[in-house]
Image (spheres, rainbow, N blue to C red):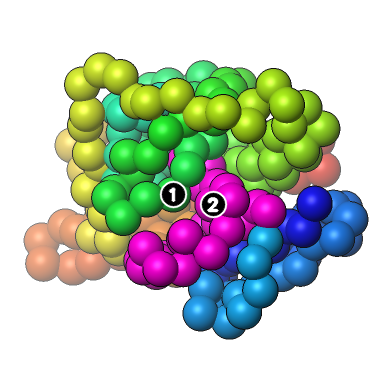
Amino acid sequence: MKIAILTSPNQWFIAYAQKLETTIQNSKLFFDHQAIDETYTLVFILSYHRIIEKKYLQQHQHNIVIHASALPQGKGWAPMFWQILEGKNEIPFSMFEASEGIDDGDIYMQKILHLNGYELNAELRNKQAEFIMQMCLEFLEHYELYKTPHQQKGESTVYAKRSAKDSKLDIHKTIHDQFNLLRIVDNESYPAFFEIEGNRYTLKIERADENRKL
């Protein structure tokens, strides 16, 4: 079985994609779908931010995406972080076949990632990536069980794209009330901030007992 791994360049998932490449035999990592010039049995499309035209999808038997929601609910952007903001610590992940639509392909597998409610951004990203890799490996190990997908069923909902402005804190709410927002902010790219009397202040969050295992 020939396997390709596709992810976007210059972003957080690259190290995990490289790890997956070393774990899966006969796999090759790509950063541009147009650079995949051979036919593969399976292409894992993981944290890839470009639209893939139909002619490229048709080259391969499976084009697999993993999305952190119980599709068809939670399509769109940053689904895990939106669900954390909703107070959820059990995050569903859906493995599905890529299509020309937005997160609307047939589903191969759905699993639940269990969080403890205290992870911050870096740990959330790590748990998300490790879970995605586990799903990829499980699919390969039990290919005969998962190879035939089923259609999505139920009401479709879509999350909006998040931006730096979504890290704004409300000065009239407590830290406890806004802890889930603090959990998902990125201290460098989109730090938490608040405004008071025309002045803007940035807050950074880190665990004081960073070495403690959760």
Say which element carries label 1.
Answer: loop
The image quadrant that residue 151 belongs to is: top left
In the foreground, 144 or 121? 144
Say which element carries label 2.
Answer: strand
Measured from the top left, where is residue 144 in percent x and y? 73, 26
Asked if residue 116 shows in the view, the reply is: no
Measured from the top left, where is residue 18 in percent x and y? 77, 65
Residue on which the image places disc 1: 98
The residue shown at (22%, 48%) is: 160
The mark found on residue 204 in the picture is none
Distance of label 1 from label 2 (alpha carbons): 5 Å
* 170 left or right, relative to 132: left
Asked if residue 76 shows in the view, the reply is: yes
The image quadrant that residue 105 belongs to is: top left
Residue on which the image places disc 2: 63
* 137 left or right, relative to 120: right
In this rendering, the answer to whether 18 lies above or below 79 is below
- Mark 1 vs 2: CB contact within 8 A: yes
The residue shown at (71%, 69%) is: 29
